[in-house]
Amino acid sequence: MEKTTQQKAMRKFTKICDIVNQYNRDKSKLIPILQKVQDEYRYLPEEVLTFVATTLNIPPATVYGVATFYAHFTLSPRGKYVIRICDGTACHVKGSNKLLETLREKLNLKDKNTTTSDMLFTLETVSCLGACGLAPVLVINDVVHGQVTREKAIKLIDEIIEKENKNAG
Amino acid sequence: MEKKVILIKDTGFKSDTTRDIQSLFLKAIRDIGAEESIQIVRAADLGIYNQGVVVKILPDNTVYTHINSDNIDQIVKAVHKGEVLENLLLKDRVEQTRIVLRNCGVIDPENIEEYFSKGGYTSIAKCLFDLTPAKVIKEMKKSGLRGRGGAGFPTWMKWSFAANSFGDEKYVICNADEGDPGAYMDRSVLEGDPHSVIEGMTIAGYAIGAKHGYFYIRAEYPLAIERVENALKQAYERGLLGKNILGSDFSFDLEIRLGAGAFVCGEETALIASIEGKRGTPNPRPPYPTDSGLWKKPSIINNVETLANISAIFQKGGDWFSSIGTEKSKGTKVFAVTGKVKNSGLVEIAMGTSIKDIVYNIGGGVLNEKQLVAVQTGGPSGGVIPKKHLDTPVSYEHLQELGSIMGSGGMIVMDEDDCMVDISKFYLKFCVDESCGKCAPCRIGGYQMLSILNKISEGEGELEDMDKLHRISQAMQKASLCALGQTAPNPVISTLRYFEDEYKQHIIDKKCRAGKCSKLIQYTINPDKCKRCRLCVTNCPVSAITGDREHGYTIDQEKCIRCGRCFEVCKFEAIARV
Ligand SMILES: Cc1cc2nc3c(=O)[nH]c(=O)nc-3n(C[C@H](O)[C@H](O)[C@H](O)COP(=O)(O)O)c2cc1C
Ligand code: SF4
Ligand code: FES
């Protein structure tokens, strides 16, 4: 009985097995492993963390501890488009928090929510992206946009929404 | 004949002078019948300021400054004949000295041959075949190079500690976690000249007796990662890494680890924990990494820029390097000059160059002709340098005297629109967010200081809060486990030192000079200036502006969220911020 559930889990997580094996089940590679897993799933579901812990033969609490320590790891699903507004110093003095306000409003994000209810957008801040000469900077799924004004930010969002609607319709 | 283009720009931003000069140029060209071979273009910006009218000749890239009606004929004739007028040439008043950035933008970073053509990898050959590890360290001592990652620890000393540590398993780590928010020197070096860092690490490995090294790179830098991966591959193919480098007895392997978004991992012991696959929390020192570092083996951690200097030092000698700079700070420093400056970008200057020269002569001065208020260096561990100290030469010792630090190379120019309380709140919040929480002084002290600053910026501050800030700062500096907590109060202490009046304005007068602290400002409409265009009405995100064309418009202060939208869009300066 024990074995069959594990087998099932193995089947469900073959991709993760591959990743873990790629790193020779080396505990010290936990961070690169989680980075790869997150590339695959876009976030780190709890059962995946437990599974990684089992395969590496370390306590789940250790894996959870690492996953929650580093800002890049996220334990909840994220939107299809991840918008990251730079809040480094150069961007701050050029008004990055106004961009943040504008987009939170535009995306109707209340309280501490960072992902829209339709799972289309996630809005985050990030520390310096190393593009300070273009401040203020925001990144949408790894595409960097520089010297962003409020108008430009809103336009970027509208374009995505339009594209999505077209695809859906 | 190749067609020449003359680009014209008045660097004082007066487009009418540019237009006049343009017609004079056109006339001069017509006079000598060169309409076919010389074209005139008005440029938006040539990146040169306060030099009068400037022209740039393409494709030669010659730049002439201070153009007036007297020398236009001369210039046109010279361009036509392909001559250069020495007396009108742009004189760089402050030269950049490029050591770290010597190859950036000059060679193709993806092609190892181009690095070879600049003398690349001759230094490692020299070290392996002509110098013992002890002699390598001796040469480093001669150079006087100090760490560029922030603290300025002498590089030779770090290396000699590790070289003298017992054991034959040792590590070299390149710190490319570049955490200072507002700086990107290390990214540029890795993207523009990755081999120089690899060569520097290999020399370090030889000097301390390490066989293995790690690049710890921020995951936010995908291009840098790609360039380093590519460079490593090429170096392995050429036998410059791996077993028996260049046929010597020395073997050295390098691999990459990616940071996962934690600023504290720039701290040496936390970085080590992170490579080991753990939470990146710092550990007490001693033991120092040079005794017990990665996997408890002797390790050295050096910054990207530090490492990029090494091969240049062995190409030209330690004496050459130490001839540049000040008495205690040798060589150059790269700064990422950003903020309210006309030419933001990377600047590499000899140590001892004044901040004023960097901002005005290289950076072109302050944007939009505003007043400079301060320049910040050292990021969240540093401080502000007020206008009156701008003549200060850049060096570890001088910046420290002023209560800032050299830091890793962020240099943010701030103008009259920047509020010093807001700036110190910004840096402190960064440290509070990034504190790992392991020790109480940093975790609790940082939070306390931030709540006090929040109070002040909301107009709820009391005079004794300034005292409290000092007291908590002292506790954090003395008792925090790592440099993050120890230096987090620096931006607050330094703004309190130079801008005490501004804090008092917030506390006593409940005013924010720069209009940044939203609780302390109000927007109102001046009916005399208002042209009733309704632009503000349509732009207000919370519909706080009401009225009609006949009676004018008013802002409902209850509804207003002080976003400043109306202030920005109004074309008639009818919105007042008080
Ligand atoms: C919180 C914190 C963050 C740091 N971040 C960096 C960094 O991003 N890059 C860096 O080179 N050094 C950073 N340092 C300094 C390093 O701990 C270390 O002193 C440096 O890498 C040593 O190299 P160097 O001697 O060549 O300067 C940081 C230190 C602290 C305390
Ligand atoms: S000073 Fe701050 S960052 Fe450093 S160990 Fe203590 S809590 Fe962590
Ligand atoms: S501060 Fe935003 S890119 Fe550097």
Image (cartoon, coloured by chain):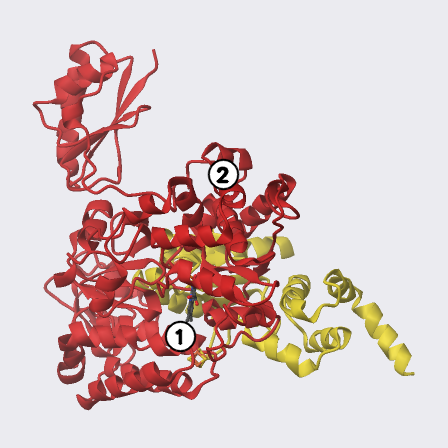
Chain colours: A yellow, B red
Asked if residue B219 can be seen in this view, the reply is no
Q: Nearer the viewer, residue B47 or B108?
A: B108
Q: For mark 2, what is the residue?
A: B122
Residue B472 versus residue B28 in the image, above or below: below
**In screen coordinates, is A22 left or right of A2?**
left
Question: Residue B232, percent across and down?
Answer: 59, 47
* Residue at point 39%, 65% (across, down): A87
Q: Residue at x 64, y 48 (%)?
A: B242
Mark 2: amino acid: Thr
C-alpha span from label 2 to label 1: 38 Å
In this rendering, which labeled residue sits more in front, label 2 or label 1? 2
Of helix, strand and loop, which one carries label 1? helix
- The x and y percentages for residue B328 are 26, 58
Mark 2 or mark 1, earlier in chain: 2
Q: How many marks?
A: 2
Which residue is denoted by mark 1 in the rendering? B484
The residue at the point 22 percent across, 51 percent down is B353
Location of the N terminus of chain B by quadrant is: top left
Name the side, left or right, on which B453 lies relative to A120: left
| Secondary structure beneath label 2 | helix
